[in-house]
Amino acid sequence: MLTSPLSNTLASTLSRIPLPAIWTSGSAQQRTLMLGVVFAILSNVLFGVLYAYSSFLAPLSGTQVFIWRMLAMWVALFGYLLISGQLGFHIDKLRTLGSVKQWAWLLLPTPIFLSQFWLFMWAPVNGQGVQTAMGYFLFPLMMVVFGCVLFGEKLSRLQWLAVAFAALGVGSEIVRTQSVSWATLWVCGTYPLYYILRRLQGIGAVTGLLVDLTIFAPFALAYLFFLAPSSLSLVSGSGFFIAMLAGLGVLSVLAMKTNVDASQMLPVNVYGMMSYLEPALLFILAVTVLGNPFESAMIYSYGLIWIGIVFLIAHGVRQLRRARSETRVMIND
């Protein structure tokens, strides 16, 4: 499993302080697994905090918060890569792209990425928080469907049940409302394409993020200077807003970095199951902290989707147990 300088530093720091026996007596692989779990939980909590962040930045609109977040993320990410000495690695990776076609292929997923980040900041303060959270619940199920359609992956019985219940849930919501939220459809329908395209390109998450943010930075600045000068004046004249937006950038990069580290340190099934912490937290925050509407009639259709998620988690648990059994057999042999 891969580790980053950040995770190596944290592991080194942890080795100098008193820790429970489960950490000190376990193998290096077990410690990596535990550290991956910590990173996964931390990243999901941070994404939950970011989901509610827009509500603390009034009177900035959701779109304005998105613009400022992209700029703050770019500064924080660029600064981190520069200080850690990793900037050259990512630049060298991009230098291997020699043709216009390769660059066009690289930039193809960028609009999807930007639209998702905009929706993440806009939805909670515009009454679409619950619907967006549901899109994130459906995202892993759609990844299963995309894998089946685009890569010919075969679905297990549990995966088929998961997809079937999710389809019933979405169908029930369409019948109930005579429509389905565009926010839900946009998250679960386009975000899988972003990850699939990046996977086909062989571009790492951090490299892709650096490209996306760098491409968008000039447009973000143009928006602030020409379309939202009042936002620029408000932020530049307030120490509170400057501190909050700096925190927004740092938290965003930290959330992305810990999430990437967790994906590298954990088995795929464990990482996939832990990814459900984020939409669950987003859903709770949307209903409680942000006050987004949730009708009792939604319980039936959303309940069917959650049943599908349970089947998908059960599939992950079964695969994980099977992998452990095969590992033990290999060791014994």
Image: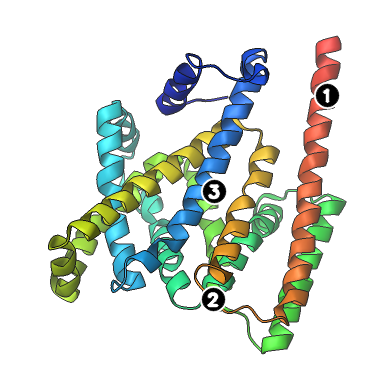
Give the farthest residue toward the top: 333
Bin the neighbour count of mark 1 within 10 Å (Cα to Cα): few under 14, some 14-19, many 20 and up.
few
- Viewer-side residue, 313 vs 61: 61
Is residue 65 among what the camera can see? yes
Quadrant position of residue 126: bottom left
- Viewer-side residue, 70 vs 20: 20
Q: Secondary structure at mark 1?
A: helix
Bin the neighbour count of mark 3 within 10 Å (Cα to Cα): few under 14, some 14-19, many 20 and up.
many
- Residue 214, numbered circle: none
Mark in the foreground, 1 or 2: 2
Q: Which residue is mark 2?
A: 292
Q: Which color scheme did the rendering employ for the protein?
A: rainbow
- Is residue 138 placed above or below 85 in the rendered structure? below
Bin the neighbour count of mark 2 within 10 Å (Cα to Cα): few under 14, some 14-19, many 20 and up.
many
Q: Position of residue 2 (x, y in %)?
A: 53, 25
Give the amino acid type for the residue marked by disc 1 in the picture. Answer: Glu
